Image (cartoon, helix red, strand yellow):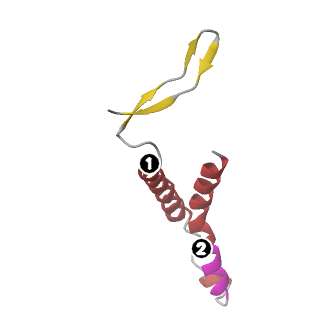
Amino acid sequence: MTKIILLRILLFLLPFLIYWIYWRLIKRRSDAGRPVFPVMILTICGLVLVAGSFFVLRATTGEGTDSTYVPPRYEDGKVIPAQNIPKE
């Protein structure tokens, strides 16, 4: 779970990092001619990347449709964990 959260944070910050690298490379300009930092555009790009990661994560993880999910249950004083039972 921590890995997924860190990945989403990294994807959100990626456009800001790319812009910072770009800005450092063209720093030769004078401060008066420097463009305004495009926070709104970078934020939208970061949110699009995070939303895309939700779709990719959903498409690449999870059980297939060829099994039935049985939730955890309590029987005879013991907790039986959740299971995916193959369909017959």
Residue 76, given in percent of the width and then of the height, sits at: 60, 9
Residue 77, given in percent of the width and then of the height, sits at: 64, 10
Q: What number of labels is visible? A: 2
Which of 4/44 is in front? Answer: 4
Mark number for residue 50? none
Give the residues in magenta: 19-27
**Quadrant in which the C terminus is drawn:** top left
Residue 3, given in percent of the width and then of the height, sits at: 64, 52
Eyeballing the image, is 37 above or below 60? below
Q: Which residue is drawn at 66% across and 47% down?
A: 2
Q: Which amino acid does label 1 sit on?
A: Arg
Dot 1, crowdedness within 10 Å: few (<14), some or many (≥20)? few
Compared across the picture, whether 80 is left or right of 68 comes to: right
The image quadrant of residue 56 is bottom left
Dot 2, crowdedness within 10 Å: few (<14), some or many (≥20)? few
Q: Which residue is drawn at 56% across and 63% down?
A: 39
Is residue 26 found inside the magenta-colored segment of the image?
yes
Q: Can you identify the residue that label 1 sits on?
A: 58
Where disc 2 sits, the SS reads helix
Q: Earlier in the sequence, mark 2 or mark 1?
A: 2
Compared across the picture, whether 83 is left or right of 86 comes to: right
Q: Which amino acid does label 2 sit on?
A: Ile
Q: Can you identify the residue that label 2 sits on?
A: 18
